[in-house]
Image (cartoon, rainbow, N blue to C red):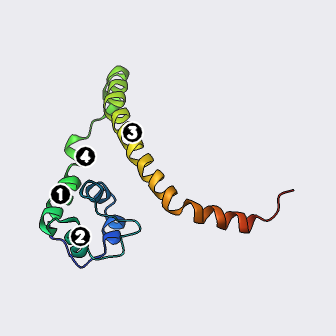
Amino acid sequence: MEIDATRMVKEIVLEEPASAKVFEQIGIDYCCGGNRPLADACRTAGVDVEDIAQLLEAEKSSAVTEDEFVDWNKRSLTELMNHIVQKHHTFCRAEIARIKALLDKVTQVHGSLHYRTKRRTSGPSS
């Protein structure tokens, strides 16, 4: 995968949201620290840009392709239910845990600012 190392990390995540997972695994901040070139972020994390490019490509290619499409109208309800439980529930549990950790981090870093702003704009309660 050809990647422009001068692009900002946050731009890469905005264009390709799946890249967030790769950056999280490597320890590259794409939120508060996302306004820096990928080359700088990689240098700080101690990884090569080429290695990140390969990981980003692997994450992108792991998405479902049209060849893997299943016409669930032609399958039984039991097959559909099993697929949902095995595939999607497992995925959702993992993603919820990942998102919760991100939410905790964002709340810890930015929560007090939001709380102060909300209190100033809400005025006295009746």
Give the residue drawn at x 23%, y 70%.
Answer: 44
Real-space CA distance between mark 2 and mark 3, rounded to the nearest whole angstrom: 31 Å
- The tag earlier along the polypeptide, 4 or 3, is 4
User: Looking at the picture, does residue 33 appear above or below residue 95?
Assistant: below
Query: Mark 1 sits on what residue?
Result: 55
Q: Which mark is residue 44?
A: 2
Tell whether 120 sits left or right of 54. Answer: right
Give the residue drawn at x 52%, y 63%.
Answer: 110
Measured from the top left, where is residue 43 in percent x and y?
Answer: 19, 71
Tell whether 58 sits left or right of 12. Answer: left
SS at badge 4: loop
Q: Quadrant of residue 117?
A: bottom right
For this rendering, which residue is in front, 107 or 80?
107
Amino acid type at mark 4: Val
Query: Mark 3 sits on what residue?
Result: 92
Query: Mark 4 sits on what residue?
Result: 64
